Image: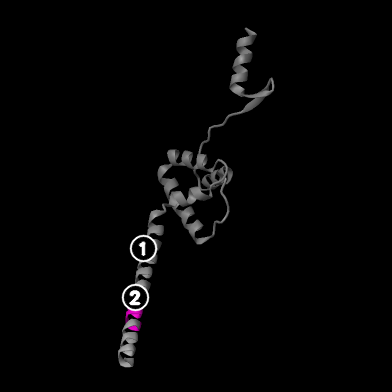
Amino acid sequence: MSEEDSELERLKAKRLAEMQKNISIKQKIESAAETTKETVSEKPRDSLIKILGFRGLEVLENAESQFPNETKMIVGKLSELIKTGEINESLDGGKLLALFRSVGLNVRMATKINVEQDGKFVSLSDKLSNQTSGDE
């Protein structure tokens, strides 16, 4: 009986070692697949959008519509800097606009001036048009 018990224990240990080996191989394959999926799936623009602050997306969209090729290259480089950790702060619209202008891209933004009239804000063009039509 003890010989059968020792044989049974040996077979159990062998089977357990095989199962552990298969599990570790499966985990390695899954982790490798996840890392490749993460690096492939995240586009440079998406990683940049994650760190954009106030009005950053507005500036980016204007730049993309006015200078599509140049903006794509800049977004790619910014994405690399984000991934390496050289850029670790939020980029608001002002910083992004200054960056584009520093490399020679004069991104035009829609400008609107509001003034207070009767306790509420109205655009300057509306206020001026009301004054000229009211004066007549």
Front residue of 72/36: it is 36
In this rendering, position of residue 35 left or right of residue 134: left
* Residue named by callout 1: 33
Quadrant of the snapshot with the N terminus: bottom left
Image spot of residue 106 (x, y percent): 51, 40
The amino acid beneath tag 1 is Ala
Question: From which residue to which does the magenta span run?
Answer: 13-18
In this rendering, position of residue 89 left or right of residue 63: right
The residue tagged with tag 2: helix, strand or loop? helix
Front residue of 41/6: it is 6
Residue positioned 42% across, 54% down in the render: 42
Name the mark nearer the viewer: 1 or 2.
Answer: 2
Contact (CB < 8 A) between labels 1 and 2? no
The answer to whether residue 22 of the structure is visible from this angle is yes
Residue positioned 34% across, 75% down in the render: 19
Quadrant of the snapshot with the C terminus: top right
Q: Does residue 95 lie above or below 14 as drawn?
A: above
